[in-house]
Image: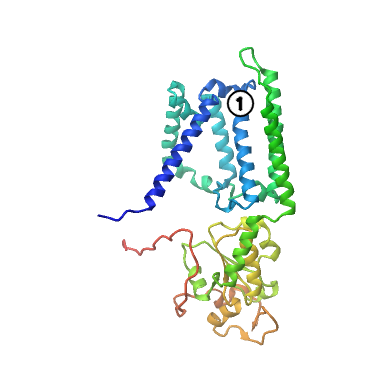
């Protein structure tokens, strides 16, 4: 008999939890009246704004609880999945969803609730959703490049986009929500029909609004006077990994990455412009230290790319790698020994060794400043001795196996 696998309990628990959450979500939607197309469509005629008020309340409350947990260090926001941002596919998809919502009276989620309560229109709308899903798959190749690349910004949140603290953005969203709720109440009073019941005033509404406002203001103030626990944790982890040399890769490993077409590699040379112009590894770019501290610049690097930072020795590269990792950049490594070590291994006499003029200075002199045009900038892997190295680069997912021709 095969031994019992304890991970099965974890899988079963996840399935049961998913079913419970799904049932609770559908139950709340149905109790809110969102299984009725007439109530859902009423928001477009302005006399019943229950959809806006219920859904936006859920969003704002979840946001406040989430970032309160983050601020007090109970939750690591980096472990929370955030959908990547695709500007143009998102705009077009939103327009299509909105038109379908108006015409059909449902969105995909509410159509499931309606079909579960045996409403015929909900069932037909749900069948339409399935038809669209099955039609989408075969037609993706027609617009795949647009779908996967147009307006792609990666994992981007509003605080990162604006460069503001989480607390300030939470407070602004709370204020926006309270303004929208007030406007929704006014629209309902303005466009209410005789058949539509008037919105009831409630002390609970006022208490909830005040509570959201207080928590939002508290988070905004705390964000100004207390350090971001996520940023502090990332910086501490980066310091430990760099001190332990877990992130320093040898020159032969970098060469293998350069010649691996399954890897997205970004070489970041943080030396002075003069040293960079004298010699640099092929395809490397020269960011400034202000760039590596800029979250917007970091977002321009592919999230799944392997980022290797190089300086003449290691000091400046370590500083740049620390700033990158502390700001959430992933897969960051340092070229061990820097450009000086690279030239010792692959230079073949191109640069004349000279005495060191100081810490992290170039120890080779070149006849001309031709950058990456020296053979050592792009060594021929097959003409270069295959030096042993201990692999340190860890990939997010296994690389596909490269096979030869003739079906090999």
Residue 383: % across, % down: 45, 78
Whether residue 51 sits left or right of residue 405 in the image: it is right
The image position of residue 277, as x and y in percent, is 66, 73
On screen, residue 224 above or below 235: above
Furthest toward the left, the residue is 1
- The answer, for residue 401, to whether it is visible in the render is yes
* Color style of the picture: rainbow
Percent of width and height locating residue 217: 73, 43
Quadrant containing the N terminus is: bottom left
Above or below, 217 relative to 115: below
Marks counted in the figure total 1
Report the quarter where the C terminus lies: bottom left
Q: Is residue 281 visible?
A: no
The residue under label 1 is 50
Name the residue located 61 percent from the left edge and 45 percent from the top edge.
66
User: Quarter-wise, where is residue 402 in the image?
Assistant: bottom left
Q: In this view, does 144 lie to the left or right of 226?
A: left
Quick one: which residue is furthest to the top in this view?
194
- SS under mark 1: helix
* Above/below status of 316 relative to 117: below
Q: Which of 69 and 94 is in front in this view?
A: 69
Image-based side of 2 in relation to 237, left or right? left
């Amino acid at each position: 008999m095969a031994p019992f696998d304890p991970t099965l309990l974890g899988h079963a628990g996840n399935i049961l939890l998913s079913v419970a959450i799904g049932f609770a979500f559908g139950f709340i939607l149905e109790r809110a009246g969102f299984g009725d197309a007439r109530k859902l469509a009423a928001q477009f005629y302005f006399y019943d704004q229950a959809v806006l008020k219920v859904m936006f309340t859920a969003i704002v409350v979840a946001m406040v609880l989430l970032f309160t947990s983050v601020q007090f260090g109970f939750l690591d926001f980096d472990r929370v999945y955030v959908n990547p941002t695709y500007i143009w596919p998102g705009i077009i998809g939103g327009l299509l969803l909105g038109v379908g919502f108006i015409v059909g009276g449902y969105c995909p989620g509410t159509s499931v609730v309606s079909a579960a309560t045996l409403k015929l229109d909900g069932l037909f709308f749900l069948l339409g959703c399935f038809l669209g899903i099955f039609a989408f798959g075969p037609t993706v190749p027609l617009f795949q490049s647009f779908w996967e690349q147009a307006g792609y910004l990666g994992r981007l949140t509003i605080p990162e986009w604006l460069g503001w603290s989480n607390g300030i953005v939470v407070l602004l969203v709370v204020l926006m929500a309270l303004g929208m709720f007030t406007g929704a109440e006014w629209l309902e009073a303005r466009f209410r029909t005789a058949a539509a019941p008037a919105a009831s005033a409630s002390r609970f509404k006022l208490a909830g609004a005040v509570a959201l406002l207080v928590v939002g203001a508290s988070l905004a103030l705390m964000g100004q006077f207390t350090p971001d626990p996520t940023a502090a944790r990332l910086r501490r982890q980066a310091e430990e990994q760099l001190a332990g040399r877990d992130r320093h890769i040898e020159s032969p490993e970098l060469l293998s990455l350069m010649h691996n077409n399954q890897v997205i590699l970004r070489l970041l040379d943080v030396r002075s412009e003069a040293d960079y112009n004298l010699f640099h590894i092929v395809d490397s770019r020269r960011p400034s230290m202000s760039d590596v501290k800029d979250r917007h610049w970091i977002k321009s690097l592919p999230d799944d790319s392997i980022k290797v930072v190089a300086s003449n020795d290691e000091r400046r590269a370590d500083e740049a790698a620390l700033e990158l990792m502390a700001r959430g950049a992933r897969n960051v490594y340092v070229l061990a020994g820097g450009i000086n070590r690279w030239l010792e291994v692959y230079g073949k006499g191109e640069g004349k060794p000279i005495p060191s003029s100081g810490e992290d200075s170039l120890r080779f002199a070149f006849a001309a400043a031709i950058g990456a045009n020296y053979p050592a900038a792009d060594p021929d892997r097959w003409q270069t001795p295959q030096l042993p190295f201990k692999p340190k680069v860890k990939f997010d997912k296994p690389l596909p196996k490269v096979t030869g021709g003739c079906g090999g």
